[in-house]
Amino acid sequence: MQKIRKLPIGIQSFEKLREGDYIYIDKTEFIYSLVHTGQIYFLSRPRRFGKSLFLSTLKAYFEGKKELFAGLRIEQLEKDNPDAWKPYPVIHLNFAQNSFSKESSLEKTINLQLEEY
């Protein structure tokens, strides 16, 4: 009997998605390319096109959470890299829930999030 997997509707956390056994379209090859080309990138997509999930996936990668990437393309791509999965400090600022009609609200949001670090 085939296992039924859940759709990740509204889930923007790579860690929750992988640990909850949701359906995931593997885009980790893009992360490998992004990390190993050494270029500067501007990531722009329309609303609801996975920006938060992609950044959450990058965060997990840079935090060295190899177990979350088991069975994904990046696991194969990094198998011969001795520096792969080395954890780095990550500062993740989330601006998704705020409206920044005033400059002071942006500054306040940044300061509140940086206080956590």
Image (cartoon, rainbow, N blue to C red):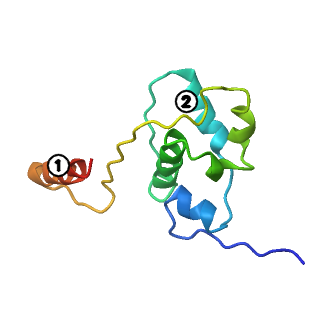
Q: Is residue 56 above or below residue 19?
A: above
| Residue at disc 1, secondary structure | helix
What residue appears at the point 48 percent right and 51 percent down from the top-left corner?
56
The label number, if any, that marks residue 79 in the structure image: none
| Residue at disc 2, secondary structure | helix
> Closest to the observer: 51 or 59?
59
Mark 2: amino acid: Val
> Which of the 4 image quarters holds residue 85?
top right
> Closest to the observer: 67 or 71?
67
Locate residue 49, reporting x and y percent: 52, 55
Locate residue 8, reporting x and y percent: 59, 68
Q: Judge the density around disc 1: few (<14), some (14-19), many (≥20) Cα neighbours within 10 Å.
A: few
Number of numbered discs present? 2
Locate residue 76, reporting x and y percent: 75, 37
Outermost residue to the top? 38
**First in sequence: mark 1 vs mark 2:** 2
> Closest to the observer: 113 or 89?
89
What residue appears at the point 39 percent right and 41 percent down from the top-left corner?
90
Task: Please state if 113 lies on the left or on the right of 31 as rendered.
Answer: left
> Closest to the observer: 30 or 58?
58
Locate residue 55, reporting x and y percent: 47, 47
Outermost residue to the right? 1
Q: In this view, does 117 lie above or below 98?
A: above
Q: Could you tell me which quadrant the N terminus lies in?
A: bottom right
What residue appears at the point 25 percent right and 60 percent down from the top-left corner?
98
Q: How far apart are marks 1 and 2 (CA)?
A: 28 Å
Q: Judge the density around disc 2: few (<14), some (14-19), many (≥20) Cα neighbours within 10 Å.
A: some
Per the image, the residue denoted by label 1 is: 111
Mark 1: amino acid: Asn
What residue appears at the point 67 percent right and 73 percent down from the top-left corner?
6
Task: Kindly check if marks 1 and 2 are in contact, taking CB atoms under 8 A apart as contact.
Answer: no
The label number, if any, that marks residue 35 in the structure image: 2
